[in-house]
Amino acid sequence: MKHGKKYNESVNLIEKGKFYDAEEAVALTTKTATAKFDETVEIHVRLGVDSRHADQQVRGAVVLPNGTGKKVRTLVLTKGDKAKEAEAAGSDYVGAEELVAKIQNENWLDFDVVIATPDMMGMVGRLGKVLGPRGLMPTPKAGTVTPDVAKAVTEAKAGKIEYRLDKTNIIHCPIGKVSFGPEKLQENFDTLMNAIIKAKPAATKGQYVKSCVVATTMGPGIKINVAKFGA
């Protein structure tokens, strides 16, 4: 794949074959961003687990202290008083059967996070084929199936992100925008990595954090020295 001049200039800022300390790597990403828009900074963490086994799943959610820099649109599927609570908390969309039908029949997906009260899960289950592949299906583990819809909406808007393994045992997550600067990005990075390390399954054998790369949307990956994570 041929890269442009700006990308190649960014690559030249990175020492080939070097594994950087996290602070140095995160700070370097802000220098490798060359796009005209405010690029997202992402981390990609490969874990020494096998996601095919239920006892080696790594999944959870964490509120990043500085948010993600992205406006999050929430959809709450609930009824009655809980619907009023969700509206008062500022949810973009609140409803029940009519919104489930809209997703099913119109493939409506103008939202980033779906929250549901437990009593709605029978109905929400019908949306598995639509929401599941997009990572939008509400789950108790991510705190998106909950009776406390107001708290869930507030956290989602504040920058709560879900982390989970893909089929190749890698977690991909945003930790903010380049415009945040190194300090805020580092706080978000530390919060997310601490959560991933705490989520280490008991069945894990050998090294848990195999590799970690940080990169901007359009920039090259910067390898991080994972020995410091001690997992």
Image: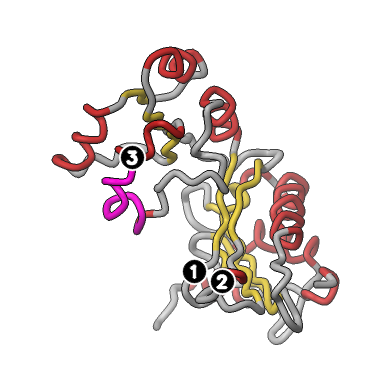
Marks 2 & 1, CB-CB < 8 Å contact: yes
Mark pair 2, 1: CA separation? 5 Å
Q: Is residue 132 magenta?
A: yes
- Residue type pointed to by label 3: Gly
To which quarter of the image does residue 110 belong?
A: top left
Q: Residue at x 61, y 69 (%)?
A: 55
Label 3 Cα crowd, 10 Å radius (few <14 / some 14-19 / many 20+): few
Which mark is drawn over residue 104? Answer: none
Q: Residue at x 54, y 35 (%)?
A: 156
User: Residue 38, how many percent across, how many down?
Assistant: 52, 47
Number of numbered discs: 3
Apparent side of residue 62 relative to residue 36 in the rendered image (left or right): right
User: Residue 210, how many percent across, how many down?
Assistant: 69, 79
Relative to 193, residue 161 above or below: above
Relative to 42, residue 102 above or below: above
Which mark is drawn over residue 170? Answer: 2
- Residue type pointed to by label 1: Asp
* Mark earlier in primary sequence (1, 3): 3
Mark pair 1, 3: CA separation? 26 Å
User: Residue 178, how many percent across, how many down?
Assistant: 61, 50
Which mark is drawn over residue 166? Answer: 1
Where disc 2 sits, the SS reads strand
Label 1 Cα crowd, 10 Å radius (few <14 / some 14-19 / many 20+): few
184 or 204, nearer to the observer: 204
Apparent side of residue 82 relative to residue 160 in the rendered image (left or right): left
Q: Which residue is mark 3?
A: 122
What residue occupies the far left of the structure in this picture? 105
Q: Is residue 80 magenta?
A: no
